[in-house]
Amino acid sequence: MTGSIKDRWRQGEVTLGAWLMVPSPLTAEILSKAGFDWVLVDMQHGCMDYETAVDMIRAIDLSGATPMVRVPWNEPGIIGRMLDAGAMAIVAPMIEGVEDARCLVQACRYPPPADAAWGRSGSARAMAWATLPRPTTAFASFR
């Protein structure tokens, strides 16, 4: 289990993850230490607010699993906030066509060349304290 989730998927490797709908950083930490490769915070159907989701992302990250978030909708503001909080992948609901997918990918990219703002409150965390280049992944690609 070495390498990023993105690299492992590119190699065709199967990964094991957990899906969290309960707003609990403790549950996120426990699942993260249970051997899962990734743990996803479900903000679409889960009942957590932004602050709780940030705490859950931090607990997942510090426990060694890859933190992912399913955002409530395909909107650049919430996507950017979750990436700034440390989510390493975004799942967006209701992607119904090419334009929706392009919007999702664009929202997940930090400048350049994206439209996302630079200097958000959590940007240092999102960039892994300047140790990783572009840590974000969107579940869509046009290359």
Image (cartoon, rainbow, N blue to C red):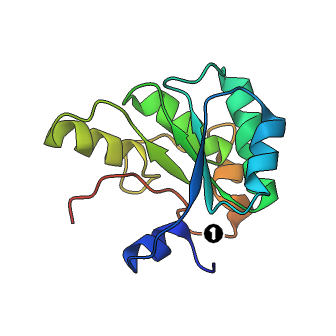
Give percent across and percent down for residue 64.
75, 62
Q: Relative to 51, is 1 on the left or the right? A: left
Could you tell me if residue 128 is visible in this image? yes
**Image quarter in which the N terminus is found:** bottom right
Q: Quickly name the residue at label 1.
A: 132
Q: Residue at x 80, y 47 (%)?
A: 29
Which quadrant of the view contains residue 131? Answer: bottom right
Q: Is residue 129 above or below residue 18?
A: below
Q: Relative to 143, is 140 on the left or the right? A: right
Give percent across and percent down for residue 25.
80, 36
- For this rendering, which residue is in front, 44 or 116? 44
**Image quarter in which the C terminus is found:** bottom left
- Three-letter residue code for mark 1: Leu
Count of numbered badges drawn on the protein = 1
Residue furthest to the left: 98
Give percent across and percent down for residue 107.
39, 42
Q: Relative to 71, is 46 on the left or the right? A: right
- For this rendering, which residue is in front, 70 or 78? 70
- For this rendering, which residue is in front, 44 or 87? 44
Residue count near mark 1 (Cα–Cα under 10 Å), binned few <14, some 14–19, many ≥20 = few
Could you tell me if residue 119 is visible in this image? no
Q: Is residue 129 above or below residue 100?
A: below
Give the SS element for disc 1.
Answer: loop
Give percent across and percent down for residue 92.
39, 37
Q: Residue at x 26, y 35 (%)?
A: 95
Q: Residue at x 33, y 48 (%)?
A: 105
Q: Residue at x 69, y 37 (%)?
A: 121
